[in-house]
């Protein structure tokens, strides 16, 4: 869990202004971090999150400290973006 908190705190979270109608933020590899950290966090979400639908698609969401986190990259080893939204 320490690595998860470190990942969250060490990344730059940017408001997704092109999707303001679905308020959320994202952290992208090109602005901060290392790919292995993104992949590790995405795997943590997959292993510890809950499955929910967004439209007709299923995603894993990790609920933590007032936010929900998710990744949409597949395969997971290509993860370079993590999303989050306030609960």
Image (cartoon, helix red, strand yellow):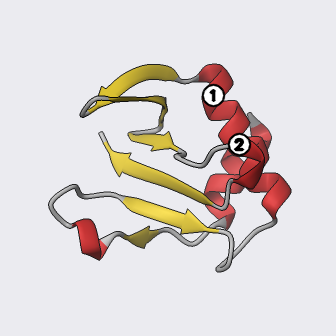
Q: Quadrant of the C terminus?
A: top left
- Residue 79 location, x and y as percent? 68, 54
**Label pair 1/2, CB-CB below 8 angstroms:** yes
Which of the two marks, 1 or 2, is nearer to us in this view?
2
- At horizontal 54% and vertical 45% (from top left) the residue drawn is 71
Q: In front: 14, or 21?
A: 21
Question: What SS does tag 2 mark?
Answer: helix
Quick check: 26 above or below 79?
below
Q: Which residue is mark 2?
A: 76
Mark 1 neighbour density, 10 Å: few (under 14) some (14–19) many (20 or more): some
Mark 2 neighbour density, 10 Å: few (under 14) some (14–19) many (20 or more): some
- Residue 35 location, x and y as percent? 80, 61
Find residue 18 and report its image quarter. Answer: bottom left
- At horizontal 78% and vertical 43% (from top left) the residue drawn is 40
First in sequence: mark 1 vs mark 2: 1
Find residue 29 and report its image quarter. Answer: bottom right
Q: Which residue is mark 1?
A: 46
Total numbered circles: 2
Residue extending furthest toward the left: 21
Residue extending furthest toward the bottom: 31
Q: Quadrant of the N terminus?
A: top right
Q: In front: 74, or 13?
A: 74
Quick check: 73 above or below 54?
below
Quick check: 38 above or below 4?
below
- Residue 15 location, x and y as percent? 35, 71
Residue 24 in the figure: left or right of residue 79: left
- At horizontal 70% and vertical 42% (from top left) the residue drawn is 76
């Amino acid at each position: 869990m320490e690595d998860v908190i470190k990942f969250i705190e060490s990344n730059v979270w940017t408001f997704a202004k092109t999707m303001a109608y679905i308020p959320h933020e994202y952290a992208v590899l090109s602005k901060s971090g290392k790919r292995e950290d993104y992949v590790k966090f995405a795997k943590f979400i997959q292993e510890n999150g809950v499955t929910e639908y967004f439209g007709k698609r299923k995603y894993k969401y990790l609920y933590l400290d007032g936010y929900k986190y998710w990744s949409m990259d597949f395969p997971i080893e290509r993860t370079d973006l993590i999303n989050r939204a306030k609960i």
